[in-house]
Image (cartoon, grey):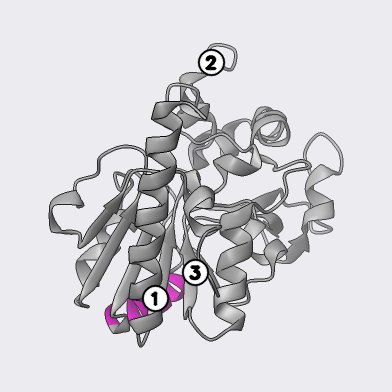
Amino acid sequence: MSRSEESRAIETDEYAEELQKMIDASRKTVFFGGAGVSTESGIPDFRSADGLYSEKYGNLRPEEIISRSYFNRDPAGFYRFFREKMLPGDARPNEAHKKLAQLEAAGKLSCVITQNIDGLHQAAGSRRVYELHGTVHRGWCTRCGKRYGSEYLNMGEVPTCACGGVISPAVVLYEDPLDSDVCSKAIAEISAADLLIVAGTSLTVYPAAGFLRYFGGSELVLINRAETQYDRIAGAVCRCNVGELMAKIKA
């Protein structure tokens, strides 16, 4: 192990020890996660140098394609991008997903609030998951509202309902509102928490990032490789990979 790797390992151990004490002392812990929670599963994030938004897809930017207006205008083009870039493929839950599920099962974690759409928290065993931006594992008819499983999203160039309507993935696209019921429940959880662990998110995507304003508990922990706007008010800021840190936590 090089000197820099050794120093990093010591820092991660220290972060883990401090976080463990907070979790053990907490009455109600809530986890709020972003794309960085799934990067260790091989799913790219959006805004880093290697993220999805740094790519070009023909003459269009990804942000244009994953908008409701583009979906309505060119559902075939949207589905080509969706199937190639947005589905998790053979990605599996990493140490962060697994440990969060274990903490929930042990009664030490109230819920997971996630901006991710990959379903890896549920795959790891988490039961109380609030998906702010929806999921790629369900769909709905844009005409009659009928719900569909993920298998329908791969049927034909453009999946269609029996009524003739186009089936949309249950993902919150640009120009879509967030689900009000999911938001209300997530805000209620954050408001009641005394420990809020925020991980793998730049906290620049609104309205989700604004949910932190509802936290009035005693301990705010940020786990992220880069700085965020909330660093100055956090009780602890951990500059390490989420899975690397969570693997050291005991449920």
What residue type is disc 2 on? Lys
Q: Residue at x 42, y 53 (%)?
A: 13
Q: Is residue 200 above or below residue 29?
A: above
* Position of residue 6 measured from the top left corner of the image (x, y, whole percent): 43, 36
Which range of residues does the magenta coloring cover? 180-191
Left or right: residue 226 compared with residue 36: left
Q: Which residue is mark 3?
A: 112
Q: Which residue is mark 1?
A: 23
Q: Is residue 56 above or below residue 125?
A: above
* Position of residue 200 measured from the top left corner of the image (x, y, whole percent): 42, 48
Contact check, label 1 and label 2, Cβ < 8 Å: no
* Position of residue 174 measured from the top left corner of the image (x, y, whole percent): 44, 43
Q: How many marks?
A: 3
Q: Residue at x 53, y 11 (%)?
A: 59
Q: Quadrant of the C terminus?
A: bottom right
Left or right: residue 23 compared with residue 36: left
Earlier along the polypeptide chain: callout 2 or callout 3?
A: 2
